[in-house]
Amino acid sequence: MKFDIVTIFPRMIEAALAEGIVSRGIASGALDVEIHDLRDHTTDRHRSVDDVPYGGGPGMVMKPEPLVRAVEEIRNRRGAPDAVILLSPQGRRFTQAEAVRLSGLAHIALLCGRYEGMDDRVPELVGAEELSLGDFVVSGGELPAMIVVDAVSRLVPGVVGDEQSVAEDSFARGLLDYPHYTRPAEFAGIKVPDVLLSGHHAEVRRWRRKTALARTLDRRPELLERADLDDEDRKLLDEIVKERGGP
Ligand code: 9WO
């Protein structure tokens, strides 16, 4: 998987890529990530990437020319990306299903906005799709871009050592995760659930599946409508409801 990331803060992205699974994916060759400093695509002496907004108002707007030139250079030198993604609060919501879709592509370019945003002609000119990580506004698109890179990279074969754990990841099935514990077996008067110490692997699997369903029911019930539940899941959900005195 090839990523190209366009930003005015390349060192911020470098730092985020220097640790963790993405850096290991780069080292193993499973990932090929190139960071592009937007200022390298300017033509004026001051390497300007922003300008005052037409119509007045606060702040500055990112100029269209450097962004369009940056994507053109990526196309010419690294090939046409399968997706050009602009991170913004007005984009389509980024979900695990989106991460799965993107992980099936070979080449993704991400454009990180700053200031008040980009000139509105850019998304159309570069064929960008807009992705949002949530209904909030941060100071730039870099951190959202790194979340997308991490979530997608985890799904690329060869990046995460234990591919099974990724596939079994509760969220991969549309559910919240089950509780995790490690030593000591009792801490601050709180004991680890006995089933996890029992050595009965089938019982442990069942307990994890049931607690993931119970947590999802309690905290994000709307996820249950979209989750790919099987008969075992439905049986466990019935059990949970009955145990709670439901119908
Ligand atoms: C901000 C914005 C707010 C309301 C409607 C549209 C918007 N677009 C942008 C935008 O692109 N902002 C740029 C990137 C510049 C300012 C900081 N940026 C940003 C991206 N803040 N928050 C995000 C973001 C990206 C993805 N998911 C959530 C927030």
Image (cartoon, rainbow, N blue to C red):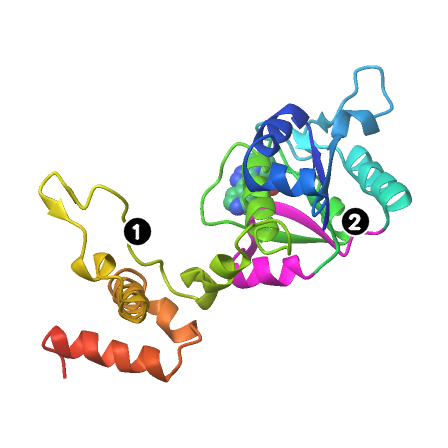
Secondary structure of residue under mark 1: loop
Identify the residue at image location x=83%, y=29%: 41
Q: Amino acid at mark 2?
A: Val
Which contiguous range is marked in magenta?
80-104
Amino acid at circle 1:
His
Q: Residue at x 22, y 61 (%)?
A: 198
Q: Quadrant of ligand 1?
A: top right
Q: Residue at x 62, y 36 (%)?
A: 23
Mark 2: is the Cβ under 8 angstroms from ligand 1? no
Q: In this orientation, which residue lies closer to the viewer: 74 or 46? A: 74
Q: Which residue is more in the foreground, 42 or 36? A: 36
Where on the picture, by quarter, is residue 61?
top right
Question: Where is residue 30 shown, x and y percent of the image?
Answer: 70, 48
Image quarter where the C terminus lies is bottom left
Quadrant position of residue 21:
top right
Q: Is residue 186 above or below residue 162?
A: above
Task: Measure the C-alpha gap from mark 2 to mark 1.
Answer: 43 Å
Residue picked out by circle 2: 126
Give the crowd class for mark 2: few <14, some 14-19, many >=20 residues within 10 Å: some
Q: Which residue is mark 1?
A: 180
Residue 111: say if magenta. Answer: no
x and y percentages locating residue 22 in the rendered image:
60, 41
Residue 161 vs 53, above or below: the answer is: below
Residue 144: x and y in percent read 55, 42
Question: For the view shown, which residue lies furthest in the front direction?
Answer: 199
